[in-house]
Image (cartoon, rainbow, N blue to C red):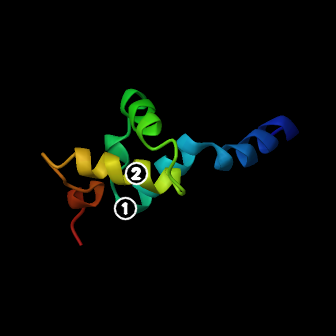
Amino acid sequence: MTLTTIKSDKNKSFILSEQVKRILHEKGFLKIFNYPDYNYFKELKKNAFNKAFEIATLFIADDQSTNTSDLQDYIF
């Protein structure tokens, strides 16, 4: 890895979309993330205190039709 690659990886953690993806990944809903919905939800929650959490909550609430986690595919 070059120094530029290392620096860009560290800077990604502050990007709002990356924070939303991380929250969705932790909850097992990463597959429902898409940028058109993200931009719409970001505009809705532009005044929220914790934007990443609020946007992730909207993604999960919007996906009530299936509402299955990525973890449902695994046998425990």
| Residue at far top of view | 36
Q: In the displayed image of the protein, which residue is found farthest to the front?
A: 47
* Local SS, label 1: helix
Q: Position of residue 22 (x, y in %)?
A: 50, 53
Q: The N terminus is located in which quarter?
A: top right
The residue labelled by disc 2 is 56
Categorize mark 2 by other alpha carbons within 10 Å: few (<14), some (14-19), many (20+).
many
Q: Secondary structure beneath disc 2?
A: helix
Tell me what residue is drawn at x 37 percent, y 61 percent. Answer: 27
**Image check: 76 left or right of 15?**
left
**Residue underneath mark 1:** 27
Amino acid type, label 2 = Ala
Report the quarter where the C terminus lies.
bottom left
Going from N to C along the chain, the mark reached first, 1 or 2, is 1
Q: Residue at x 22, y 56 (%)?
A: 73
Q: Is 76 located above or below residue 20 in the figure?
A: below
Whole-percent x and y of residue 26? 43, 61
Three-letter amino acid code at the position of disc 1: Lys
Residue 3 falls left or right of residue 56? right
Q: Residue furthest left?
A: 65
- Badge 1: residue crowd in 10 Å (few <14, some 14–19, many ≥20): some
Q: Nearer the viewer, mark 1 or mark 2?
A: 2
Residue 9 occupies quadrant: top right
Horizontal relation, residue 42 to residue 62: left or right: right
Are the residues at dot 1 and dot 2 in contact (C-beta closer than 8 Å)? yes
